Amino acid sequence: MTQEVNGTADVDWDALRKTARDAMNRAYAPYSGYPVGVAALVDDGRTVSGCNVENASYGLGLCAECGLVSELQNSGGGRLTHFTCVDKHGEILVPCGRCRQLLYEFGGPGLLLETPAGVLPLSEMLPQAFGPGHLTK
């Protein structure tokens, strides 16, 4: 299923969600039992993904979004344009506030997020966000 959002090109959200589910199946979540997978499109057409990786020292665990931005940078950088996140049941999950801030750094306010309420720009999910532009003022 493709969906036209705010004048953007058609995006196959089902395919993007499948990529996130595939990533979720590779998550390392022995402590919480809550694997998470994410996938995003990049402005150059690539797709990047990530999964959460827990650690016995709980605070050292990595969220799926950390893995995604690491893959983004490792595979050439760019800007995220469309993003989805799934839980252990493969259902759409909204990123936490910390992860929204991370996504803002690499996608900005126009990044489109798939949410249970539909596709929304990150600017609606993280209003009045702090970003790189604030550091140059």
Image (tube, rainbow, N blue to C red):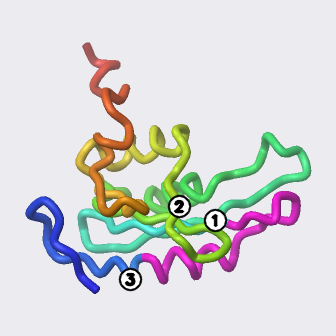
Determine which residue is flagged by label 2. 93
Furthest-left residue in view? 7
Element at label 1: loop
Real-space CA distance between mark 1 and mark 3, rounded to the nearest whole angstrom: 17 Å
Determine which residue is flagged by label 3. 14
> Is the residue marked by circle 3 packed among few (<14), some (14-19), or many (20+) residues within 10 Å?
few
The residue that appears at 55% across and 72% down in the rendered structure is: 91
Determine which residue is flagged by label 1. 36
On the picture, is 19 further left or further right than 40? right
**Three-letter code, disc 3:** Asp
19 is within the stretch colored magenta: yes
Residue 131 at x, y percent in the picture:
35, 29
> Who comes first in sequence, dot 3 or dot 2?
3
Furthest-top residue in view? 137
> Who comes first in sequence, dot 2 or dot 1?
1
Q: Are marks 1 and 3 in contact (CB under 8 Å)?
A: no
Residue 104 at x, y percent in the picture:
38, 42
Real-space CA distance between mark 2 and mark 1, rounded to the nearest whole angstrom: 9 Å
Reply above or below: 11 against 105.
below
Element at label 2: loop
Q: Are marks 2 and 1 in contact (CB under 8 Å)?
A: yes
Element at label 3: helix
Numbered circle sitting on residue 122: none
The residue that appears at 36% across and 58% down in the rendered structure is: 113
> Is the residue marked by circle 1 packed among few (<14), some (14-19), or many (20+) residues within 10 Å?
many
The residue that appears at 31% across and 65% down in the rendered structure is: 42
**Figure label count:** 3
